[in-house]
Structures are given as C-alpha cells and as structure tokens.
Amino acid sequence: MSTAVNLSSAASDEPERGPAPYPQGDQPAPTFKQLRRAYGFDEVAIVPGTVTINPELTQLGLDIGPHHFAIPFIASAMDAVVDPSFAIAMHRAGGLAVLNLEGVWTKYHDPGAILQEVASVSRDEATALLQHAYQQPIREDLIHRRIQEIKAGGAVAAVSVTPMNTKRWAPLIQEAGADILVVQSTVTTARHESTSIEGLRFEKLLKEIHIPVVVGNTVGFEATLELMRTGVAAVLVGVGPGAACTSREVLGIGVPQVTATIDCAAAREYYFRESGRYVPIITDGGIRTGGDVCKCFAAGADAVMMGSPFAATTEAPGRGYHWGMATPHAHLPRGTRVAVGVNTTLQKLLYGPTSRTDGTENLVGALRTAMGMCGARTIREFQQAEMVIAPAIKTEGKIYQFAQAGT
C-alpha cells in the first residue's frame, strides 16, 4: 500500500548561475533518495469479506509469554493512565495495563498532590511543573511496593522502564515479582551505540532475567526483525502518533501507524517462518475510535496499546488530563499535557453499552463486529482482511453530519 516517488536532482559546478540543467539524451537523472507513500488511519478502509459471521463467534485474545489476556487491549505506561488500582481494574476487564516505573508512582509515596497540581495549572505551566516533579529519584522501596500492590489485586504486574535504566532496575523488578517487563523509549533498536562500556543487549538481558520482555518502539521491518531475533516476547509499534506526544513535531521522526503496522507485521511473519516462534506486535498510539482499533488489526497487529482513551475514564488517576512519557524530559520535552476530560468508564470504553455514535466507546464490540463483517473468526484471520487506500472514507456522503456538528 505504498507508491514510490522519485526525487531527482542534478549537480552543477556553478550553482550561482541558476538551477541545474536536466540531463540530456540517454543520461539518467541522478537520484539521491526515494520517498514512498505511508498511510494513517484516516486514509484507509477495510473491505468487507465474502462471508460474514455473528460477532459473538469471534475469538479475541493475546498471549505474552505464559500470560493470556481475554482481550488484546493494553493501557499505556503513562502516569495519568495507569496506577496500581487501574492495573487491577484493567486486568479484571480482561486486558493489561503497564505501570511506568520512572514516573510519579515510584518517586512519591503519595503522588496525589502532584497529580492534582498538574491538573490545576495552565497548559503553559504544566511542562515545567512536570519537569520539576520528575527530578526526584526513583525509590527502590516504591518499585517493590507498586508491583506488590498490583499483584495483591490478582492482576498481572506489567511494568515499564527506559533502555537507559533497564540494566540497573531489571533484577530488582524481577525480584519484586513483576510478571512482564516493558522496555520502552521513543525509538528502540537491537543495536544501540553509546559511550558506556557495554550498552543494553537484549540477548544478555534475557539470560539474566526470566520474565517476558516487551520492547519498543519501532516502525520498520529490519529493526523489528532484529529485535525479534534477540528473543523478546513482543514488540511495540509506533513513533510519535499519541495525542500527548510531540516527537513528530520536535524531531520529525515517525511513520503513520497503518504503514508502520504493516511493515512490522511483515517482520513478524518473516521471523515466524524463520524460527517457528510467533512474536506479537502491538500497535501503540494514535488510536481514538473503534475504527482505528479495527484498522490496526487488519493491518497486522496482535494487540493495541492506548493512552488517551483510557485517561478519560473514571478509573484513571490523571483527573481528566494526560501527558506523554517524554513530556518531563529535562532538556528536550517531546510531549504536552492534553485535556481529555473524565467522560466514560472502563466498562463503557471497552464493552459499552453506549449511546455515542462516534466510535469512542465499546471498542471490543466494534472489533468483534468488524471481524464478523470480514468473516474472520480470529485475530489471525482478521489480519488477512483486504484494505484499500480510501482518503474519502470518513467524508463521503457525510455532508449533514459536518453541517450539523456542534448543534
């Protein structure tokens, strides 16, 4: 689902005389690089199948290592989304929530005052406040405590750290009883060069700890394949699409999520044929509606990770606000605080019932219905659904909806 665009240029020994001439005769135009077309959620559509089935016949689920989840939905490791209580509620709903171990939950015994202050200040003041709040050191006792709080509620304890802190904290995280470790940064690769004597090597990490390790984020075939070859349990897909993330604006880095998911799914299939080991990919970020969720799976995802939709639930700790993991970065913030409101519950968001018509609630129901319309009984079958480039998919015939929006 990509189209190559050849950008040609011709060198000139005398650029001050004007534009370089086009090549003459049979001489080919010199090429510097080619750009391919990449697609986001609003530019594609899923084609219905030739067979349909009832939604209740569809089979959802996600396996990460030995852990099975009834629904393939994961809540992002963001302080305004997941606290121990939310992780327990998400587990009871059938999904997984990841706790950020480098945020306020391991820096403060009671982060309530910090969260309230973040919710109270203006948007312009919020980033500076978060930068100051996150300067506090991570406390070992709070790492252990938060993991145990999740475990005490009967939930799978999934926790997140950045690559730079993984070697330091991974043994303690395993000792504290965590079930899944997520190593996550804006971009993570299997080959990272640094000034340290030895950087993080996932092959070595997986020999030292014995819990599943999920790694992200990535958007490309080769980077995903190399990560899978290290033995990781799953890979997160997505750079910069999240509602609270500004990496694309600050760094210019990213690939639209549909194309990123397709490319990473191709790596998963290649690695599966190569090794016989199936490594799930998790589309992370930019997902707003049931339609977005369904397009992730049709593009090849095994699960979705979301932040802002969960931040708007009554169970989330952010008090109607949400910010990205890189927002508090001391030198180059790559996120912002966004107001999402508190306008739904975890039950309504995932399962309904709902009276909303914009696809922002009953996401599991939307997924099952789309699978049924494509004749897909399983996620694996739904991954084979046909997709088309359809830039008018959300506007065609919607004149009355647009004219009456807000009335």
Image (tube, grey):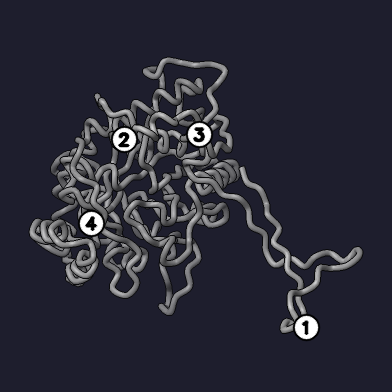
Residue 386, horizontal then vertical, whole percent: 57, 30
Inspect this view and state whether residue 118 appears.
yes
Circles 2, 4 touching at the beta carbon (< 8 Å):
no
* Amino acid at circle 1: Asp
Nearest the viewer among 149 and 35 is 35
Say which quarter of the image contains residue 184: bottom left
Q: At 20% across and 67% down in the image, what residue appears?
A: 125
Q: Which residue is mark 4?
A: 175
Name the kind of residue labelled 2 in the image.
Thr
Gap in angstroms between the C-alphas marked 4 and 1? 65 Å
- The answer to whether mark 1 and mark 2 are in CB contact below 8 A is no
Distance CA(mark 2)–CA(mark 4): 39 Å
Are the residues at dot 4 and dot 3 in contact (C-beta closer than 8 Å)? no
Query: In the image shown, does 49 or 140 lie closer to the viewer?
Result: 49
Q: Of tags 2 and 4, which is closer to the observer? A: 2
Viewer-side residue, 200 vs 284: 284
Quadrant in the rendering for residue 167 = bottom left
Please name the residue that numbered disc 3 is placed on.
Answer: 393
Instruction: Nearest to the eye among marks 4 and 3: give it.
Output: 3
Q: Position of residue 222 (x, y in %)?
A: 57, 55
Mark 3–mark 2 distance (CA, rounded to whole Å)? 17 Å
Q: Answer left or right for 31 relative to 1.
A: right
Cβ atoms at labels 4 and 1 below 8 Å apart:
no
The amino acid type found where label 4 is placed reads: Glu
The residue at which mark 1 appears reads as 13
Q: Residue at x 69, y 61 (%)?
A: 7
Q: Does label 4 or label 1 sit earlier along the sequence?
A: 1
Q: Earlier in the sequence, mark 3 or mark 2?
A: 2
Q: Is residue 288 above or below residue 10?
A: above
Q: Secondary structure at mark 4?
A: helix
